[in-house]
Image (tube, grey):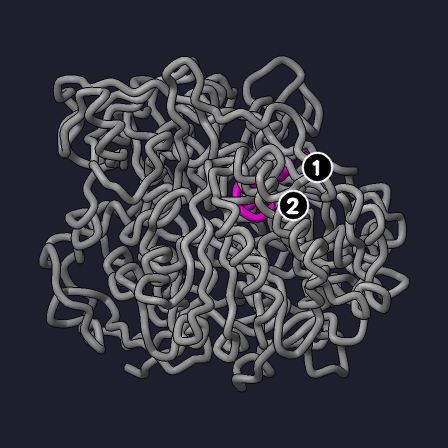
Amino acid sequence: MNPVDTHCPYCALQCAMTLTPAAAAATPAAAATPAARPAPAVRPADAIGLPVSIAGRAFPTNRGGLCKKGWTAAELLGSAERIREPMRRAADGSFAPISWTDALDLIADRLRASRAEHGADSVGVFGGGGLTNEKAYQLGKFTRLALGSSRIDYNGRFCMSSAAAAGNRAFGLDRGLPFRVEDLDAADTILMLGSNVAQTMPPFIGHLDGARQAGGLIVVDPRRTATARLTDDGAGLHVQPAPGTDLVLLLGLTHLVLAERLADTDYLARRTTGFDQLRYSVAGWYPQRVQEHTGVPVRQLRELASRLAAGRGTYIITGRGVEQHVDGTDTATAAINLALVLGLVGTTHSGYGTLTGQGNGQGGREHGQKCDQLPGYRKITDPAARAHVAGVWGVEPEQIPGAGIPAVELLGALGRPGGIRTLLVHGANVVVSAPDADSVRRGLKNLDFLVVCDFFFSETAALADVVLPVTQWAEEEGTMTSLEGRVLRRRRAIDPPAGVRSELWIFQELARRLDAPGVYSADPSAVFDELCQASAGGIADYSGLDYTLLDAGEPAYWPYPAGSGGTPRLFLDRFAHDDGRARIVAVTPRGVLAPAQTRGALTLITGRLLEHYQSGAQTRRVAELATAQPEARMQVHPATAAGLGLTDGGWAELANERGTVRCRAQLSADIRPDTVFLPFHFPADQRANLLTAAATDPISGMPEFKRTAVRVRAIAGPDLPTTDHERVMADA
């Protein structure tokens, strides 16, 4: 069987890999995989009962390397836990097989009934940042035309929305990295704010080597993470502010750059507007005041500002740590303002960017999953945009609903009078990933009807009325768009199990049953061609692309209008606003600046582990990964632990008005004494998002994941479920 070149199914670095199908896909991976082994150059298939072998492939982003998740990705394809036929919930709560015909007929009947009784917007759709471009596009089209509903959003709202909103208003365009990842190799200074790439996308750290050798890697994080430790031994600087004070830190750095005459005044005059307002807005953020709010010493502030201005190649990169706040858009804007004041953006040697997390987080938000957007990153409220897309879809513009509501608001409307009565979920596990998770769980249980498309019985699927089994990454054709805006081909290496279908086929079949306007192809190539037409002339223009070009290996960075060669580096000549200038938007802290910890509470921040991905619905089912990190552990400073009676490995309870989490404590001096950290990959009573609030950024709709007040106490070990299946059933 011939090897197939494709890309990793996990994060947006989209590491290149080659899959070689096994002579026979034998026993499920979970039954034959050792608990742990060193990552080999090739992950063999036949020797350990996998359907494909995996080899890293030379590519600019990963240079042949893969992380643990990538090396073990094949083990889910033949998993014994995989759903292989449609399942329907019985009256007693158990699930029984149902034929595809009966499942789709039932779903179509319930969709029609909900629309007839409660209106089109009583049907909601929740998408995912892991769907291919083709699926994301078709999901948006299906929702708006076949269902007639405006109620669609996706889990990218939890990841990239603040960075996207900031990029759009500053540059007129949102592409995570407006340059190539490999451009970072030549930098001597890289400021990373709120990102732990050493654990979330390990091959990325090879692109930090130049800055480390120059002593210019600067990591801003309340924890001394694996990425922060890369600054040791003279390789750079770790800045450790209090959680939620990143906006003040950035305002203070901008104040210093201006006060010490380090700004690029010629660049500001030629390429930006709004500088005067910025100068006034940062005037009061002098170093001593910033130190009081952030805990970052004045000496370190001055050192950081000086280094950023002196770098021969300087990049500022933000991640979720500074964006997942109720002021996340303003914080990302403050980082952009600092980059503009230094003259970094739109040059060949420096820049600003933000790191997309999910595999297709970039493409997933460009083509219609977001509640306010149409394909090509067009605004759904723009009459010209509506007319263009309607023409491609073969309908009148009036048939396309208006803007919907963002994810947190959408989830808050579940099961409520006048809200959403029927929900379709694709590529998301909101019972674990959404803020105020127990409220979301209750909303799902109050629905009239819930349909989930998934590979496994995730915590969300366990609550569904119907679960539809869908193809995994190595079983499908399509495209993904990486964190640097490069459109990549996902290729099919093996056939899916007999009872499994692609979402494209599901959309086609449901649209036919609903007598929907428009055409719904199940052929990914045809869907991509239509996507490219729909995007033509938009911000994210793919109109010059097709599978033939992508299969030839041509680097394809959007915008890629017909007749062009794409755009690896944006903004070299102009920004995407009509006047070609970047917008400097003055921002100031809103509300109370005091730390979250009051009256004995601590500040909880959430995040990722090396071995797990997103809600853990996939990685918790890989034996090697689950053995390495089988449960949530709360990281806490030893001094704090001593005051609370916590011991390393002992049990702790974190609680607030929304919920209670019980987990083991992990004592570490790598975290601030006023802060605790909890990974968000785990289910049942270890869900970090039982504690987080549904409060959101007013501009982006981003939830506040990184600053939650909790009370912590030592407890005796609880009687927790021991297997992943037991944990899923506990959530159901």
Q: Is residue 378 magenta?
A: no
Precedes in sequence: disc 1 or disc 2: 2
Q: Secondary structure at mark 1?
A: loop
Verify CB contact (< 8 Å) between mark 1 and mark 2: yes
Residue 515 in view of the camera: no
Q: Is 376 drawn above or below residue 43 in the view shown?
A: above
Q: Is residue 154 magenta?
A: yes
Residue at 37%, 52% in the rendered image: 500
Where is residue 362 drawn, in percent x and y? 58, 58
Residue at 82%, 50% in the rendered image: 395
Return the residue at label 1: 588
Q: Is residue 541 left or right of residue 500?
A: right
Residue in the foreground of this view, choosing between 60 and 550: 60
- Looking at the picture, which amino acid does disc 2 mark? Leu
Where is residue 617 drawn, in percent x and y? 33, 43
What range is drawn magenta here?
150-162
Return the residue at label 2: 251
Where is residue 443 drawn, in percent x and y? 49, 20
Q: Quadrant of the N terminus?
A: bottom left
